[in-house]
Amino acid sequence: MKKITTLAFIAVLLASSGIYAGWFADEKKPSSKNQHSDKIYNLKLAETWPSNFPIFGDATKNFKKLAESMSNGRLKIRIDSKNKHKSALGIFDFVKSGQYDLGHSGSYYWKGKDINTLFFTSMPFGMITSEQRAWFEYGGGQELMDEVYGKHGLKSIIGGSTGNQMGGWFKKEINSVDDLKGLKMRIPGFAGEIMAEVGAKPVNIPAGELYTALDRGTIDALEWVGPSLDLRMGFHKVAPYYYTGWHEPGTELQFIINLKKYRSLPQDLQTILTTAMKLSAYQMYAQSEYESAKNWENMKKTYPNIQVKTFPQPVFDAMRAANQKLLKKLSANNPLAKKIIKSQSDFLQKARAWTAISDQAYLNSQSK
Amino acid sequence: MKKITTLAFIAVLLASSGIYAGWFADEKKPSSKNQHSDKIYNLKLAETWPSNFPIFGDATKNFKKLAESMSNGRLKIRIDSKNKHKSALGIFDFVKSGQYDLGHSGSYYWKGKDINTLFFTSMPFGMITSEQRAWFEYGGGQELMDEVYGKHGLKSIIGGSTGNQMGGWFKKEINSVDDLKGLKMRIPGFAGEIMAEVGAKPVNIPAGELYTALDRGTIDALEWVGPSLDLRMGFHKVAPYYYTGWHEPGTELQFIINLKKYRSLPQDLQTILTTAMKLSAYQMYAQSEYESAKNWENMKKTYPNIQVKTFPQPVFDAMRAANQKLLKKLSANNPLAKKIIKSQSDFLQKARAWTAISDQAYLNSQSK
């Protein structure tokens, strides 16, 4: 009797404790009742993006196509875009509550709900895509993400990289830290906090109003993505300085899964689901790089006055100091944040030493 | 009657003409006879590598696990390593003849059988992994690979990137083109031909004898892979100069599929097969980067005398000239080679312009 009680207690503890959610997610035993059946599972996915949003929206379409084809129609995925569900930043709650089974969004949008979700998109002065994916897949990143999301009854999977994001479009050149003082810039999130630390005035403006705000001088600068998505926004027509990146060196979107729903699927469909997500995430990076290459060539030809600039070292030094200060603040009284920051920083150090003698050395030797 | 004859003629033409093989491979109509059945398909895969070869061998194990799990056991994959089939470089013929259904190897190994297979692994002074995968997936690379392999009744799919390969281990420093004259170096394939053009003596020595050959001075230098796989070979103990890469900037392995077998599978299993291959290919790159980061840190600590060097510009200039000369020779009287070389060169130009203002600019600005 004693033994049963203890086991029952552990079972309740495991079921209620998000920390162990990853165990269930990865368990290998198929749920026998659904094996070999033709039962159809209808899953609803909510995405942050509007209908037919390029690249990001292609990733969810690609995922749907792969999952439905591999399951021979046993999985049916309905994708609701922002136009339908009306809440770009409601994805986390939608999937947590079970209103939707799946989501496609960005982890750092949820930092107001759980600060530890901040670390799984891209961190200022952090890893580039090849480094960060090594961390996610082999360096402990997925396990840390499972720990953070498991607490909410969720699982998060890589959702596609935009590549290295550009530092943004500026109307004036930045030659010193002083040039940042009072600068009105659209730059949201953690990078915005760094900008505030060095004296800029980060502001938030809806996407649809950005071009006019920049044109009329309501703002002096903004960051968006990179050539893959900037071209259609037209910023290059009103702000000639295009700064290279520092704040999102390898922006990885996310798929979110409701864990209860996930566990209710037969094992083969679970693997189909996560495999389709991961492959479409990897392919989205290839598409981003392709579109950026194509659009950057186009932008340079059409607008030869665009000037690519990199912040001077003293500006980076000030930003890096602000970044360290803010990370230290995040670590205080938050052991999990401390653990994630340490894991990323330790891996970045060794991964960057390798990148330095491989891709970086090669690129530099061939661009002389 | 006339009409039937014409159709039959076209059918025979299509079936025998490899150029159109890709049409069959991508056709969307499921082969109805196998739908919704629990029929088990046993597929045999031959890999170039010996049993339990790290990273490369993990890619095939990962593929097998994904394919079997997603198909709920309807696909059973048997992996035969070199130890079993005894012919590391027999993979192409094994799969072409149908002796094996699948293979895992490197496309450039088949240049003696079909020179146009040379272009689908990595070319000297070519694309890095992120650029080349954009080309494969969105820039027309897969279609060109289909054209080349379709002629042999085969389909080739990306099989995993080693990342940027190091230029190799040298016993003496290379300060000028003269230092390459007569240099005995283990460097196979097209890169070896470039080395010969600039005066070196490329030699081929079995892997098991490389360490002794380098130690005793039978050879002066060799290239292998990079820290991910070099560490266990011990070359750093006998050749202190570790040169950065130029000859294989983004080595992509390949999965090979017998097209006739592929077409005989139900549509869902076809998608499961190629999806499992692609995801394990993408994950192999993450693993390579992870292992290289870890091993490079280890090598630097254990052997602080390793000196990382980059060839001086005049050496690169001579090698690049030799590369251009050899590519021109390959293009002569080979319209398909000419088309592939042009596609790669055009895409490299725009992709590199983007890499230059994204990852390269970021890496350089943060390593000052």
Image (cartoon, coloured by chain):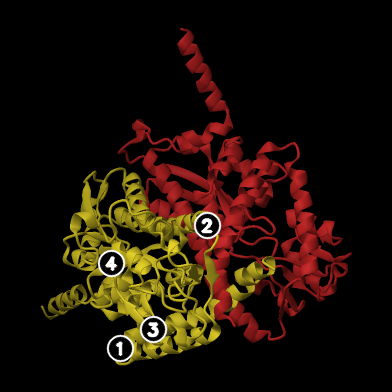
Chain colours: A red, B yellow
Is there a contact, CB below 8 Å, between mark 1 and mark 4? no
Q: Residue furthest front?
A: B216
Position above or below: B116 against B84:
below
Residue at horizontal 67 percent and vertical 48 percent from the top: A118
Q: Earlier in the sequence, mark 1 or mark 4?
A: 4
Q: Quadrant of residue B140?
A: bottom left
Q: Is label 2 or label 1 in front? A: 2
For disc 4, the neighbor class at 10 Å (few under 14, some 14 to 19, many from 20) is few
In percent of width and height, residue B358 lies at: 62, 70
User: Which residue has dot 1 on it?
Assistant: B334
Q: Which mark is residue B206?
A: 4
Q: Earlier in the sequence, mark 2 or mark 4?
A: 4
Q: Which mark is residue B293?
A: 2
The answer to whether tags 2 and 3 share a subunit is yes
In percent of width and height, residue A323 lies at: 76, 55
The answer to whether tags 2 and 4 share a subunit is yes
Is there a contact, CB below 8 Å, between mark 2 and mark 4? no
Q: Is residue A81 at least partly visible in the picture? A: no
Is disc 2 placed on a helix, strand or loop? helix
Q: Earlier in the sequence, mark 3 or mark 1?
A: 3
**Mark 2–mark 1 distance (CA, rounded to whole Å):** 41 Å
The amino acid beneath tag 1 is Asn
Q: Nearer the viewer, residue B188 or A249?
A: B188
Q: Nearer the viewer, residue B282 or B194?
A: B194
Residue at horizontal 58 percent and vertical 32 percent from the top: A18
